């Protein structure tokens, strides 16, 4: 295997505050000719009338190629999560009963 074909390994570090993450219950996706943007926010869905208050917790801008890779990774992880949830719902699993 040549050096160009060798698997690359990432060594990414984050401070504890970043690793803790932020909570978001709303996302907006937009794009231009050159990039995609995902804006994550925490909104108060309990407001029944008028504007829904919220605060942006993070905004990520990315290239179209990275967006495609992110979509693939999300689909893969969601499919594996669905499979695991389906197994837990089987009576043979012995999980908590309703």
Image (cartoon, grey):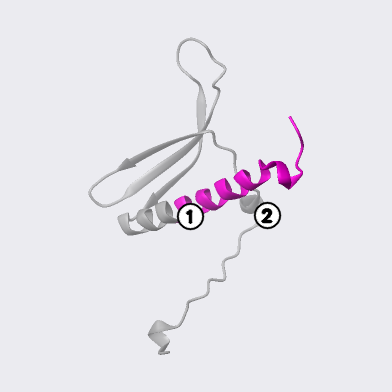
Closer to us: mark 2 or mark 1? 1
Q: Position of residue 57 (x, y in %)?
A: 53, 38
Task: Determine which of the numbered discs, if any, sits on residue 16 in the image.
Answer: 2
Residue at 33%, 48% (x, y): give it.
Answer: 36
Instruction: Determine the image quadrant of residue 16.
Output: bottom right
Q: Secondary structure at mark 1?
A: helix
| Drawn side of residue 96 relative to residue 26, left or right | right
Up/down of 19 relative to 86, above or below: below
Asked if residue 87 lies left or right of residue 41, the reply is right
Of residues 43 and 91, which is closer to you in this image? 91
Q: Position of residue 11 (x, y in %)?
A: 57, 71
- Is 19 inside the magenta-drawn segment? no
What is the residue that sits farthest to the bottom in this orientation?
A: 2
Split into 4 quadrants, where in the image is the N terminus? bottom left
Q: Is 86 situated above or below 13?
A: above
The structure residue drawn at horizontal position 22% and vertical position 49%, both measured from the top left corner, is 33
Tell me the crowding category of disc 2: few under 14, some 14 to 19, or many 20 or more residues within 10 angstroms, Cα based: few
- The rendered magenta stretch, by its main secondary structure, is classed as helix
Percent x, y for residue 4? 38, 84
The residue where tag 1 is placed is: 76
Residue at 54% across / 15% down in the picture? Answer: 47
Q: Give neighbour class at mark 1: few <14, some 14-19, many 20+ (Cα, 10 Å).
A: few
**Pointers 2 and 1 in contact (CB under 8 A)?**
no
Give the Cα separation between the discs numbered 2 and 1.
27 Å
User: Over which residues does the magenta segment extend?
Assistant: 73-98
Q: Secondary structure at mark 2?
A: helix
Quadrant in which the C terminus appears: top right
**Picture layout, residue 96 above or below residue 77:** above
């Amino acid at each position: 295997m040549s050096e160009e074909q060798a698997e690359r390994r990432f060594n990414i570090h984050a401070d504890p505050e970043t690793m803790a993450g932020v909570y978001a219950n709303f996302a907006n996706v937009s794009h231009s000719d050159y990039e995609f943007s995902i804006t994550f926010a925490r909104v108060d869905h309990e407001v029944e009338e008028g504007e829904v208050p919220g605060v942006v917790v993070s905004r990520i801008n990315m290239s179209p190629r990275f967006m495609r890779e992110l979509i693939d990774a999300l689909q893969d992880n969601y499919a594996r999560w669905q499979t695991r949830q389906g197994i837990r719902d089987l009576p043979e699993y012995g999980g908590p009963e309703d």
